[in-house]
């Protein structure tokens, strides 16, 4: 296959398996249809075949008693008789003898190896015709002796009988099950091909190879509610690194991203504003943005988070903040309140400026001088400012403010956004005045190999919960 369309390093085996599990019902339906159709076809097209056989001793009338002589004589007789079986003379005699207009039968005459025994077999769809045809052949050989030899004598060693069972036993069940299995297998291969050919980012290697950018970090799939009780009561509203039930690997992933951000900040201390966006909805950008802020706060940094996704705000939901306790950011941008009133001081230690409800026409707010002033003031008040924006493929809000921030990063959820769309967003960020840090691969699931045992490890199911609806 063309490397342009299939990148071996972008093949996700787990994604293929998950695709099979999601479409198991289609696979079963196709396999079931294969079983039913093949069973019906085999049953309707089945034609039984019955074979009758007789064995005869071939000797000359005046036998010498020598075995070798009898064998050579039998070979000659059988050879001539084999040729005669295919002649119109024999076929016409048999049809006349059997009172049939069409001789739909297979006749075979052979010599049993190293003997003077001749085996005559006739196969047809009528067991009686097969039986009678052998008798007709042997009864008419005398009339045809002028074509053979007048010295041949045929003594029956094993007389033919009417076959009671067909040679080709009908087994539609086994055959149809096999065909159904093959249909199901072909369907699985089709789904696998669809998964492989889908132009999305499926592996860590593909981020740098196909997007030609930096992989800033990888966030593994994290199970939100592991117990039945938590699934019922929905005790965990968001996956945050401050939660006591979050895995260490999840926390370390954000710590690694935070270290890289701090490194860039230390190189240029005056730059401290970071824009976080994604290509599409439901890629987990808000969760990534909030967890980066929490990781920085745990290191003693003063952090302000601006939820600039005013169309679909998520921060207050993730932190379980009552809307009545908030001042909507649009009031601040409209000049109806001051910055001190708009900042919400959360119990986690971070400060937030948020919307309490969805708004339309937010692009005007984004490109306004008030937004520029807000980002500038926040950068002077805090060590780091995290700006969460709407998805870039849906609206131009992120593009409107990307030149106002110092750094930017793109959240890419595994196997969601098309590669071309991701590349467009990467190019926009690279072409802006901000320093593009790279992509964060989110909700990453993969079969991992244990280096110590060299066997497949248990799949670590870790997911960043998505609030970007």
Image (spheres, helix red, strand yellow):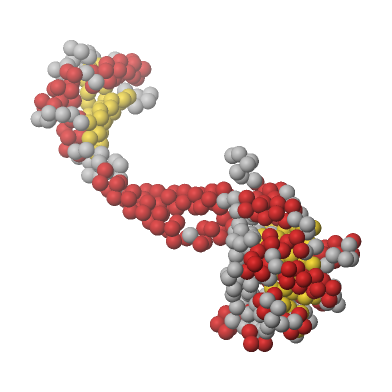
Q: For residue 109, what is the image quadrant?
A: top left
Identify whether 438 is placed above or below 147: below
In percent of width and height, residue 64 lies at 29, 15
Residue occupying image coordinates x 82% and y 64%:
261
Q: Nearer the viewer, residue 317 or 390?
A: 390
Residue occupying image coordinates x 60% and y 65%:
281
Q: For residue 353, what is the image quadrant?
A: bottom right
In percent of width and height, residue 205 lies at 71, 52
Residue occupying image coordinates x 27% and y 43%:
46
Residue occupying image coordinates x 72% and y 58%:
439
Q: Nearer the viewer, residue 127 or 27?
A: 27
* Residue 453 as seen in the image, left or right of residue 88: right
Identify whether 134 is placed above or below 405: above
Q: Nearer the viewer, residue 202 or 448?
A: 202
Q: Quadrant of the N terminus?
A: top right
In percent of width and height, residue 392 lies at 64, 60
Q: Is residue 410 visible in the rendered structure shown here?
A: yes
Q: Is residue 219 visible in the rendered structure shown here?
A: no
* Residue 48 as seen in the image, left or right of residue 290: left
Identify whether 324 is placed above or below 3: below
* Residue 149 as seen in the image, left or right of residue 96: right
Q: Quadrant of the C terminus?
A: bottom right
Identify whether 212 is placed above or below 250: above
Count of numbered circles in the view: 0
In percent of width and height, residue 270 lies at 88, 66
Which residue of the protein is positioned furthest toward the bottom in this rendering? 324
């Amino acid at each position: 296959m063309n490397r342009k369309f299939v990148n071996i390093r972008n093949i996700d085996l787990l994604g293929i398996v998950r695709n099979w599990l999601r479409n198991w019902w289609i696979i079963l339906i196709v396999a079931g249809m294969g079983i039913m159709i093949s069973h019906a076809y085999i049953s309707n097209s089945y034609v039984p075949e019955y074979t009758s056989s007789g064995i005869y001793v071939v000797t000359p009338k005046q036998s010498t008693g020598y075995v070798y002589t009898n064998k050579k004589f039998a070979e000659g007789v059988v050879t001539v008789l084999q040729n005669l079986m295919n002649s119109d003379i024999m076929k016409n005699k048999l049809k006349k003898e059997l009172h049939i207009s069409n001789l739909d039968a297979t006749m075979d005459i052979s010599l049993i190896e190293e003997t003077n025994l001749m085996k005559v077999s006739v196969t047809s769809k009528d067991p009686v015709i097969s039986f009678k045809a052998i008798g007709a052949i042997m009864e008419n050989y005398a009339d045809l002796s002028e074509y053979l030899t007048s010295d041949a004598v045929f003594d029956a060693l094993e007389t033919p009988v009417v076959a009671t069972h067909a040679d080709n036993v009908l087994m539609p069940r086994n055959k149809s099950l096999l065909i159904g299995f093959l249909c199901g297998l072909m369907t699985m291969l089709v789904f696998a091909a669809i998964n492989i050919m889908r132009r999305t980012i499926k592996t860590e290697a593909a981020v740098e190879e196909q997007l030609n950018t930096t992989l800033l970090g990888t966030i593994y799939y994290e199970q939100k509610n592991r117990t039945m009780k938590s699934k019922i009561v929905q005790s965990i509203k968001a996956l945050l690194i401050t939660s006591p039930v979050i895995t260490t690997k999840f926390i370390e992933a954000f710590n690694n991203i935070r270290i890289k951000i701090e490194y860039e900040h230390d190189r240029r201390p005056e730059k401290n504003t970071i824009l976080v966006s994604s290509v599409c909805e439901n890629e987990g950008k808000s969760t990534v943005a909030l967890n980066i802020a929490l990781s920085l706060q745990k290191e003693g940094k003063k952090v302000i988070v601006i939820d600039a996704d005013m169309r679909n705000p998520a921060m207050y939901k993730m932190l379980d903040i009552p809307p009545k306790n908030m001042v909507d950011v649009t009031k601040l941008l409209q000049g109806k309140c001051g910055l001190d009133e708009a900042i919400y001081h959360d119990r986690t230690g971070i400060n937030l400026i948020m919307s309490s409800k969805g708004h339309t026409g937010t692009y005007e707010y984004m490109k306004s001088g008030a937004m520029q002033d807000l980002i500038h003031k926040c950068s002077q008040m805090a060590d780091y400012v995290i700006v969460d924006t709407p998805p870039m493929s849906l609206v131009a809000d992120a593009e409107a403010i990307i030149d106002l921030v110092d750094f930017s990063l793109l959240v890419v959820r595994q196997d969601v956004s098309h590669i071309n769309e991701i590349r467009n967003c990467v190019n926009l960020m690279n072409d802006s005045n901000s320093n593009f840090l790279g992509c964060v691969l989110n909700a990453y699931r993969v079969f991992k190999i244990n280096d110590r045992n060299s066997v497949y490890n248990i799949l670590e199911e870790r997911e960043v919960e998505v609030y970007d609806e």
